[in-house]
Amino acid sequence: MISLGSLFGQSNPPLIGIDISTSGVRLVELADAGKGEVRLERYASEPLPRGTVVDGNIENIEAVSEAVLRVWKKSGTKVKHVALGMPPAAVITKKIILPAGLAEDQLEVQVESEASQYIPFALDEVSLDFDVIGAAPNSPEDMEVMLAAARREKVEDRVAIAEAAGLTATVMDIESYAARSAAQRAIDEQGGVQEGQIVALFQIGAQATHISVLQNGETIYEREQPFGGIQLTQDIVRAYGLSFEEAEARKKAGDLPDNYGADILAPFLENAALEVTRAIQFFFTSTPYTRIDQIYLAGGCALVPGLLDIIASRTRISSAVVSPFKGMQLAASVREQQLRNEAPAYLVACGLALRRFG
């Protein structure tokens, strides 16, 4: 069986997480601090030229490899084993039921047989992995297995990027899974949520917003909407005649004319709040659920001034920004103030780095 690079398997330390997104490459290295504690050793980011990664597809392997090498050098890490992520749209996942107690080789044969029914590609074009979740609900003689499959070329692109940067891709995860594991850990550090509560995680990135709705740690709904921080940057470009790169830099630095808040930022915030309320309504109309108890924001856009307040106001749902490093020890080289301003953008990279711990 062709493995999706230990999609579900445990990895041996040490391991760094590298998130390749539309806007840039982010790296996180975590360490075991003992007594169940985790320490953030280092983190770094490197922007990517526009058009390098489009809708999760690597359009320029060389440019991404160079950015990965730059971010690896910038971080100061010596670790060369990496966990990478696949965009959710590039991976087919399916829960299947198989007889309990199968030997490993029998299990692989059964999984391949089942996979051929659900995957719209020839199996020799696919990287495949699976994870035994546990006993099947209401059927103790069966077990529930999560199947995951991706086009082999998509996996190989990411492996090639790591290799070109002198690194070894040890784990290939799904970005939304990595994000959820990091968010869940951070939420637990913040006191967690009560049994039965429904939590919505909005990862607002450069081009898209990924919505995950969870209950008792299980994902009950997922969706992606084409809305992100790039729209604010483009508004700045149009309003002030800046290059895209300059607009992005000045947006982050807060170095914009006096009318920016009222004329550019306020309409963007209204639009963002509308996207979030629409997503929630879509969740209600397409599932049996009728409430959300808590909203968490993450992604590079989460800390745009005013965004959290307007979302809480429009949805009338308790809202917070989630930092994936909540409750972690920080290495001496990590600047806490800077981290606070950047942490939500590192949700996926942190989730990938957490795969070091299985």
Image (cartoon, rainbow, N blue to C red):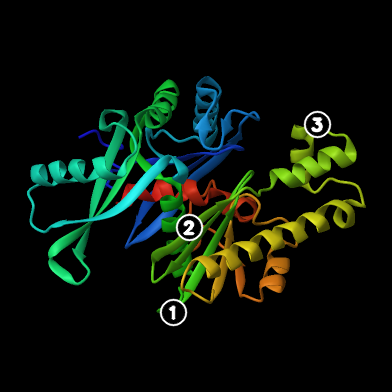
Question: Looking at the image, is 85 positioned above or below residue 210?
Answer: above
Q: Quadrant of residue 124?
A: top left
The first of marks 1 and 3 along the sequence is: 1
At label 3, counting other C-alpha atoms closer than 10 Å, the crowd grade (few under 14, some 14-19, many 20 or more) is some
Q: In the figure, is residue 303 to the left or right of 106?
A: right
In the depicted structure, whether residue 120 falls above or below residue 125? below
- Closer to the camera, 224 or 282? 282
Which residue is painted at 21% across and 46% down in the image? 114
Q: For residue 276, which quarter of the picture? A: bottom right
Q: Which residue matches tag 1?
A: 194
Q: Which residue matches tag 2?
A: 222
Quarter in which the N terminus is drawn? top left
Which of the two marks, 3 or 2, is nearer to us in this view? 2
Q: Amino acid at mark 2?
A: Glu
Q: Residues within 10 Å of mark 1 (few under 14, many from 20)?
A: few
Q: Is residue 65 visible?
A: yes
Q: Which residue is mark 3?
A: 243
Mark 2: which secondary structure? strand
Is 259 situated left or right of 159 in this image? right
Three-letter code, disc 1: Gln
Residue 349 in picture, x, y percent from top left = 48, 46
Q: Nearer the N terminus, badge 3 or badge 2?
A: 2
**Mark 3 secondary-structure assignment:** loop
C-alpha gap between disc 2 and disc 1: 21 Å
Of 343 and 104, nearer the camera is: 104
